[in-house]
Amino acid sequence: MSAETDKHRVEWLPWSELNSSQRIGRMGLYGAGLLVLFAAAHTLVGVLVPATRAPSAADVSPAAPIAPLTDAERKTGIETLCKVFQIYRIPKTDEDADAAAKNAAELFKLEGDPSPARTGQILTAVSHQFSAGQLTAADCAASGQPLPTQATRAQ
């Protein structure tokens, strides 16, 4: 081989011939290679293996058509949402109502343990009744879940 060819050749030195900084560099190279392999494997598994998680009440779209609420479902929805409203207050917008319904679905089980989809529908419908002004703090008090007043919040 010519001297020109030798100048561009990469030579892999045995571990025993490396000084300490070269060993650290090679270990870093191995570590980076492992990270790339793990990331590629994780991505590949995520693509090839579909998610098997059951849908929760929080996954339900509020725009999904729903069956009318029964009186028992409405009462349970009010009681459950009022517990959330004690912390976050009654929602004033549809976005806040959706967030309140999602929080309630994650924190509480409704009486009668309806399906996650039905739970989401009940809580979303009732929460929107609060944001629209059809239900008020008086409904929470009537359900046994009174909301704190400004005076009790200040204490």
Image (spheres, helix red, strand yellow):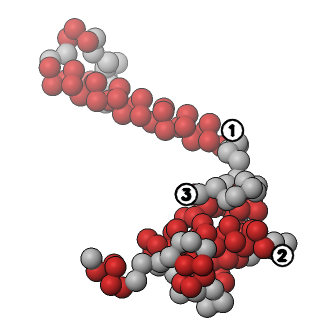
Residue lying at 64% horizontally and 55% vertically, measured from the top left: 109
Amino acid bearing label 1: Val
Examine the rendering and report whether any part of residue 124 can be seen.
no
Q: Nearer the viewer, mark 1 or mark 2?
A: 2
Residue nearest the observer in this picture, 103 or 50: 103
Query: Quick one: which residue is furthest to the right in this view?
Result: 67
Residue lying at 28% horizontally and 11% vertically, measured from the top left: 14
Tell me the residue that label 1 is attached to: 49
Q: Quadrant of residue 57?
A: bottom right
Task: Residue 59: give x, y in percent of width and height.
Answer: 66, 61
Task: Residue 48: give x, y in percent of width and height.
Answer: 69, 39
Tell me the residue that label 3 is attached to: 107
Q: Left or right? Give the position of 24 relative to 91.
A: left
Task: Residue 24: give x, y in percent of width and height.
Answer: 21, 25
Judge the density around disc 2: few (<14), some (14-19), many (≥20) Cα neighbours within 10 Å: few
Residue lying at 66% horizontally and 89% vertically, measured from the top left: 134
Task: Residue 130: give x, y in percent of width and height.
Answer: 61, 83
Tell me the residue that label 2 is attached to: 68
Examine the rendering and report whether any part of residue 39 can be seen.
yes
Q: CA distance from mark 3 to mark 2?
A: 24 Å
Amino acid bearing label 2: Pro
- For numbered disc 2, what is the local secondary structure? loop
Q: Earlier in the sequence, mark 1 or mark 2?
A: 1
Amino acid bearing label 3: Leu
Q: Nearer the viewer, mark 1 or mark 3?
A: 3
Above or below, 44 relative to 63: above
Q: CA distance from mark 1 to mark 2?
A: 37 Å
